Amino acid sequence: MEQYDVGLVCLNGHEVNSASRSSPQFNTKCCEECGEPTIDACPKCRTAIRGHYLGGYTCADWIAPKCCHECGAPYPWTERKMEALASAIQELDELNDAERSKLKESIPDVIHETPKTQAAIARFKKAIGKAGVIGGKLLTEVLSKVAAEIVVKSMNIT
């Protein structure tokens, strides 16, 4: 049976403690990076956030999950990233309302890897080109912070 410790993450997604049960001395009520409160369970279903894997050897660093493994709901930090990307899209005056709307519909497909991710990447690349220097830079910077790893690699952004 798989066993995980419980992760502690702030509402902005900063990983505070991957082993909040076995190493509680590293727990904090608020994030030392941004000051936001920390949580150790899904706000929707109250299932503990999967932390460090206890079932064997791993050398991988722990990364806070995007969604709850039990109910599938996005964690608050994922929702905030999606909102940040929607705000950046709204600032792109070079795009018409239909183009901005289509980009916003594609947000889940750049945050998570889905069958629609490649089409979403193409849509965002096109928008970056059309958005001009300032708008393109804004969109690229936000995507580099919020998009799934495959999107960042495919778009060649860091």
Image (tube, rainbow, N blue to C red):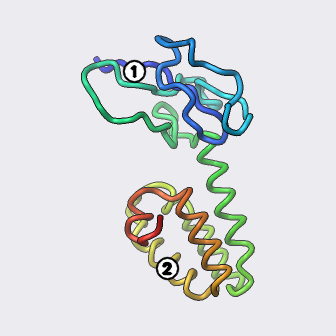
User: Which amino acid is tagged 1?
Assistant: Tyr
The residue drawn where x is 65% and y is 42% is 12
Residue that appears at 63% across and 85% down:
133
In this orientation, which residue lies closer to the viewer: 140 or 103? Answer: 140
**Side of 52 where 59 appears, left or right:** left
Q: Could you tell me which secondary element the residue under label 2 belongs to?
A: helix
- Quarter holding the N terminus is top left
State which quadrant residue 84 falls in. bottom right
Q: Quadrant of residue 118?
A: bottom left
Q: CA distance from mark 1 to mark 2?
A: 38 Å
| Labelled disc at residue 135 | none
**Front residue of 16 and 95:** 16
Q: Position of residue 46 (x, y in %)?
A: 60, 23
How busy is the neighbourhood of tag 2: few (under 14 within 10 Å), some, or many (20 plus)? some
The tag on residue 4 is 1
- Give the vertical position of 43 relative to 96 (above or below): above
| Depth check, front residue: 54 or 44 | 54
Depicted 149 relative to depicted 54: above or below: below
Q: Which residue is mark 2?
A: 125
Q: Which badge, 1 or 2, is on the more N-terminal residue?
A: 1
Label 1: state its secondary structure: strand
Identify the residue shown where x is 49% and y is 62%.
110
Q: Amino acid at mark 2?
A: Lys
The percent coordinates of residue 42 (x first, y second) are 59, 29
Q: Position of residue 150 (x, y in %)?
A: 38, 61
Crowding around mark 1 (Cα neighbors within 10 Å: few <14, some 14 to 19, many 20+) is some
> Residue 35's x, y, as percent?
74, 34
Vertical relation: 29 (above or below) 59: above
Residue plotted at (59% across, 24% down): 40
| Residues under numbered marks 1 and 2 in contact, where contact means CB atoms less than 8 Å apart | no
